[in-house]
Amino acid sequence: MGTEPEGRLTQSWTQPPAASRVGITLETYILDGMMGFPEATGAFTSLLNQIGLAAKLITSKVRRAGLANILGYTGETNVQGEQVQKLDEVANETLLSSLGRRGHCAAVASEELEEPRVLSTDPRARYVVVTDPLDGSSNIDVNISIGTIFGILRKKEDRAGAEAADFLRPGRELLAAGYVLYGSSTMLVITTGVGGVHGFTYDPTVGEFFLSHENIRIPSGGGLYSINEGNSGRWTEEVRRWNAWVKEEDKGTGRPYACRYVGSLVADAHRTLLKGGLFAYPADRKNQRGKLRLLYEANPFAFVFEAAGGRATTGSERILDIEPTELHQRVPVVLGGTEEVTLFEEFMRGKR
Ligand code: AFP
């Protein structure tokens, strides 16, 4: 299925559906992707299905979190030095066990794990997954949208297990990436790259994801910006100049732009993808390399935004071209429509 052979995905995985297919299930979408490739072994298809299953299981846990009394801190800290809440662990274990069940995923690198977890030592397990199983966890106990972020890479060689080198690869090598948003409804957004970005909304009454947002393209303009303004005292002069510009009054360019900031990357990025504008978490005096993580936060979103016709940059460099050196490496992140991101970069280069 073009997913199975080496390198990038091709043909039916990368073709947007000819006629509208709104209403088909995620499973049908995934299976249809495989149908164009008679030589497909089904491994990639199966992996995507397991991600869909994990999304259903996590959504049910997120929805019942208060009822099941599983909110609250465990008292432990994760590798980022943040307090781990129980739901983070639940989401992490749910994803790991779903991905481990069919034997196609060799290993997972997760925000919750210091080192990758090997799931299969069978050399036929040809994929590795990067994930932030429950992003925005500080929003859990105030009932605000959170999400799961994922990316799939092909393992470098057909040998047993996986090692750090299988994960330390530029985001442009992703075979697929996406996220699940646990919002007013649960949505799974996925792309295999040039085939476009597709959004599936979960119907809890039947337990299925249905295609609701076909071939998402980020609108240009939008008049929205999303940034933690509380950090402005720590920003560089260039970021402050850009920020002052978006707040200036100017009818011609539709300014001032409206500010929207949830503090959950999945929610802020999803709104930006659908409504346009720009999301930024730049480097600042405290977070000198940025705050967000390259492998499992920035790269999957960069992959999604580019596939939707937008751009993703650090402010000076394309995110998908960064050669990672560490599993939990941080990076400045700017996501948005082409014009908005290009303008931000002009400010960063001192051209404005
Ligand atoms: P938590 O998972 O600790 O809530 O962090 C969320 C996050 O990594 C990302 O989802 C947000 O975009 C970003 O942090 C928000 O950071 P600030 O709270 O510093 O604005």
Image (cartoon, grey):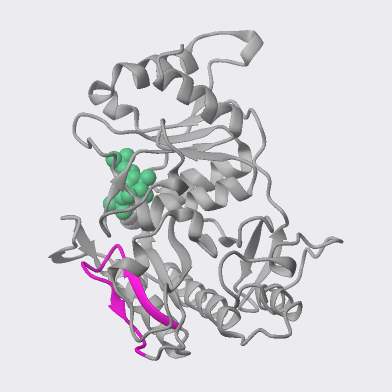
Nearest to the observer: residue 117 or residue 179: 117
Q: Residue at x 40, y 85 (%)?
A: 100
Q: Residue at x 23, y 25 (%)?
A: 234
Residue 10 vertical position relative to residue 271 in the rendered view, above or below = below
Q: Residue at x 44, y 89 (%)?
A: 101
Q: How many marks?
A: 0
Is 120 part of what is drawn in magenta?
yes
Q: Position of residue 209 (x, y in %)?
A: 64, 71
User: For this view, does 344 lie left or right of residue 66?
Assistant: right
Nearest to the observer: residue 57 or residue 341: 341
The residue furthest right is 19
Q: Position of residue 164 (x, y in %)?
A: 28, 68
Nearest to the observer: residue 69 or residue 159: 159
Residue 99 vertical position relative to residue 187 in the rendered view, above or below = below
Q: Residue at x 74, y 69 (%)?
A: 12
Residue 143 visible somewhere in the drawing: no
User: For this view, does 105 lie left or right of residue 201?
Assistant: left
Residue 84 visible somewhere in the drawing: yes
Image quarter hosting the N terminus: bottom right
Q: Position of residue 38 (x, y in %)?
A: 73, 85
Residue 147 vertical position relative to residue 89 in the rendered view, above or below = above
Magenta extent: 105-121
Nearest to the observer: residue 182 or residue 45: 45
Is 102 part of what is drawn in magenta?
no
Q: Position of residue 261 (x, y in %)?
A: 43, 37
- Dividing the picture into quarters, in which one does residue 188 lie? bottom right
